[in-house]
Image (tube, rainbow, N blue to C red):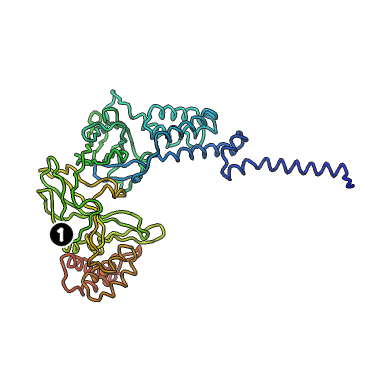
Amino acid sequence: MIRIKVRTLLGMLATVALLGWFGYSQLPSFLYFNGYPEALLKWFPNNEFARPALNELAYDYYKDTGLDGDNYLFVTSAGWASGGGVQASSTSKQRADVIAELERLLAKYGFSEQGSDVAFNLAKLHMWNKEWEMAESLFRQVAEKGTGARIGGEELKAYLAMLESRDEQPAIDPAVEGSVTIDGQPAVDAFVFLHRTDDTGFHSPPFLTYPMTITDKDGRYRFYDVDPDEYEVGVGLLPEQLDGYYLAETHPKSVTIHDGNVGESVRLDFRFVPQVVTVSPSFGAVIESDELRLQWEPYEGASYYEPSLTSLLRDADGKYVGSTSKPLTGEKIVGASATFSINELQTQYGGLRKSIDADGRVALSASSLIGIVHPGGEFIWSVDAYDANGRKLSSSAGYFLEGTSKAPLFRISEEGMLEGDRLVMESRYEDAIASYELEGDNDRALRALARLAHIGLTERDGDPREALRYLERVKEPNEADIALIEQLKEKIKEAEASTGSD
């Protein structure tokens, strides 16, 4: 029989109790760091980890809705657009379920140290649902009763200012005002913002960066307290609202706010009108001949048209990273069709565009290397409609290219394509150079080699001397070759002058 002294037994029990207490005290941190926020809140509601667990839980609910400022597309009076692309929004039921869950958490924890961020995310969700009154009420309660890092912060102030801007102030003249319409109907609950024209950057989405307001039931917007400066005005709408529409050219392109311009409101209206409808080539068409014939439906009020071609810029993984567009002709097309020679288009080039990702990988526009149209390539075409005064009425171009099924994307037959061309389109530039070198004195290969040498395959510019040596071997130089030769000679001359001055 084993005999244990009382003192020993008490020591063992104390050790077990100590270990139990230690384990219990560490359980909240274990639950938090291992992804069990609900269990932590249920068993340890007053623990120091309760607040971050609740905030994390609320944010997880919120982000799962797929509804946020990133869903919006922003189009400015200057004609440029920005946005997160077309994103799938959650269903109304999914959003309603998340709202109900956040309301349950808010009812349980209230506007306490734990619950303030729950209310904040709930307010944002009501805001993206365009339930303005509910959002404003929650934001105000958070500002008055809540605590935490966000409270009193710039984010909360920006959302409140935006929501308060919906109400007209009859006693004050707005600095900037106007209306937003889509196909002649008021665009209710659209976002409108101001962006300084001398600000070359743009924060997207712009909700917390620039002055912003919301259109009323008549599609009208107003800005009251605006710092003196020159601004572009921009409109934020959901992709489904803009699908099939285009912003008619605005006048003026920007607005200028002067010091003390009380009673001198500046007006700028936005009219989104139906896009020009393209007929052929349609999505998925393959051009087998040398003739590229574009056809579209006549646009009401149009005196002439200008067609353009867009080449997609992809990285080494084939992912879309941008685009380059170029007018197909400098002439005004009077009818609703235009015909071009593919062989002639192949001797025209887009601008030398280089994209570099975070890993230092370079992506080059194929149109700048092997022509705006080339065998085996895929392209999107568009056409702009103008009135007799040269004002753009509309365009067939949409505001997002990733939904290529909505755009007239066509392909050129691979007949006549060089292996180097294929490698360029696959962003395998070193392999393309080696392949073009094997072509000898093939003019097309020499042109591609010259442009690859000119733009360079790293962040630094290429070598103009090497590029010139390739072009001087071209047997039948065209206008683009001659223009590039002059450009390269000028660069070499400038480099020599700089070296001499050093």
Give the total number of marks visible in the rendering: 1
In this view, 87 is above or below 446: above
In this view, the residue in front, 375 or 161, is: 375
Dot 1 corresponds to which residue?
291
Does residue 260 appear in the picture of this structure?
no
* Element under disc 1: strand
Question: Does residue 476 appear left or right of residue 224 in this picture?
Answer: left
Percent position (x, y) of residue 131?
38, 29
Q: Which amino acid type is shown beneath numbered disc 1?
A: Glu
Within 10 Å of disc 1 (Cα), the crowding (few <14, some 14-19, many 20+) is few
In this view, 307 is above or below 184: below
In this view, the residue in front, 463 or 291, is: 291
Pick the quarter of the image with the C terminus: bottom left
Question: Which residue is at a point 57% across and 41% down the rendered structure image?
Answer: 36
Question: Does residue 321 appear left or right of residue 141 in this picture?
Answer: left
In this view, 480 is above or below 335: below
Question: Which residue is at a point 56% across and 43% down the rendered structure image?
Answer: 35
Rendered image quadrant of residue 418: bottom left
Percent position (x, y) of residue 351?
24, 59
Does residue 281 appear in the picture of this structure?
yes
Rendered image quadrant of residue 477: bottom left
